[in-house]
Amino acid sequence: MQSGAVPVLGEPGEAEFELPAATSADVFPSDFTWGASTSAYQVEGAAAADGRLPSIWDTFSHTPGAILNGDNGDVACDHYHRWREDVALLAQLGTGAYRFSVSWPRILPNGTGPVNAKGLDWYERLVDGLLECGIQPWLTLYHWDLPQPLEDAGGWPNRATADAFVRFAEVVASRLGDRIHTWMTLNEPWCSAFLGYQLGMHAPGRRDDALALRAAHTLLLAHGRATQALRGIVTGARVGIVLNPTPVQPATPTEADAAAARRADGYFNRWFLDPLFGRGYPADMLEAVAPLFTPPSDSDLRSIGTHIDVLGINYYRPTVVRAKPGAYLGFEEAPPDAEPVTAMDWVVRPEGLRELLVRINHDYPVPPMAITENGAAYTDAAPTDGQLHDPERIRYLAGHVDAVAQAISAGVPVTGYFVWSFLDNFEWAWGYGSRFGLVHVDYATQQRTIKDSGRWYQRLIAQQTA
Ligand code: FCB
């Protein structure tokens, strides 16, 4: 760990360290939350420590061909053992909040059944360590690591998984409820359902349209019921969900592409936002998936529409689609056009974030929103002399912070911004090759090095909280 001395920032005036104009214009209120995010499977490692059993991601990442370079999360950033050093780094960056997730298979190794006290003890130590440093813990219950036995019993398409999730929420809330104010039930249920059960790109690697729709429904039901359970245990809890909505544009102004964009918007966005805000599933989409999905009961829809106190938005890029007759819902993503892309070929378009926030605020009765993830993978060079220059990441982040400022100025209630990610980590199917961190991790030595982007973020937070 660094000695605790504040690291040397880039000189003001150095172009790459410039802060977005909006940050000097009093747009962000003084109680705005500046944070950084991770998730359990991506950083913790210690896959078999202290009673933890496999999740679907342990199984999937050990499946030949599933992950780039055959990587897996067995060790990851070894955050499980290095959390003290990592909390000190978060404090050094000046983050006011740390968004992390709880590994379900550490707490309930079989998904149901006996509670593993050692797992709960570890999260309690982490949370206490954060609070001692004045960092607010933002806890996500589910960031994709379903205990494998629950998958063996049918996974998210099985309604019983919602019951198991509610119990998991209750167990965690009973232990940490006196210390955690902000609770997120699920991270990006679109990914869990459709990348996991329809496209086979994420765990559990299934490819079945109907199963994916059922998975999405069980996830939403689990969210609504867990929200109620959390409120019953934690007085004054602020409870929400994290989505990954995307602004969808047609590739061309043709009628066919416009219709494709409308369906893509239904698939990515409205399928989740409409029922969460009490409207049930969108009628045009129910019609489009009619042979595959039976509309659920009103009682399920009432649970899903349970009031939330905060909506987490993860934004990385916009989506451009074009018509593709015969494809599921009749569309496909168009390849990136002339705009800049990240190392993962994700289009960089900060205005997409502003448009998305304005649109969601216009179309839905939203509670305060927080940008719970935003960031970019670039091919960073290895650090030299304790420094790593990543000007592209700084530009990406600055552009998006500006976009948030513009949304706030347009009247959208955004109260927090979290960079993805605090640390370089296991980027799911992309393995360790895609680095998103403010802090570089040398996976051979587990050495951490604050990147220029981390120093830039430190300066931004210092300026905003002065
Ligand atoms: C999001 C995930 C997060 C991370 C980023 C890059 O979809 O929530 O875990 O992988 O993408």
Image: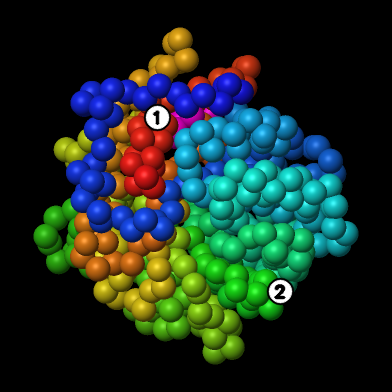
Residue kind at label 2, given as amino acid type: Ile
Residue under numbered circle 2 = 233
Residue kind at label 1, given as amino acid type: Arg
Q: Residue at x 43, y 79 (%)?
A: 277
Instruction: Please indicate whether residue 120 sits to the left or right of residue 390 in the image.
Output: right
Q: Residue at x 60, y 74 (%)?
A: 236
The reply to whether the C-beta atoms of the residues labelled 2 and 1 are less than 8 Å apart is no
**x%, y% of residue 49?**
81, 37
Tell me the magenta residue range.
432-439
> For residue 229, what is the image quadrant?
bottom right
> For residue 73, what is the image quadrant?
top right
Q: Toward the viewer: 316 or 421?
A: 421
Q: Is residue 246 above or below residue 216?
A: above
- Mark yes or no: residue 211 visible: no
Can residue 438 be found in the magenta stretch?
yes
> For residue 183, what is the image quadrant?
bottom right
Q: Residue at x 24, y 68 (%)?
A: 411
Residue under numbered circle 1 = 455
Specify the quadrant that holds the C terminus: top left
The extreme left residue here reads: 253
Badge 1 local density, few (<14 within 10 Å), some, or many (20+)?
many
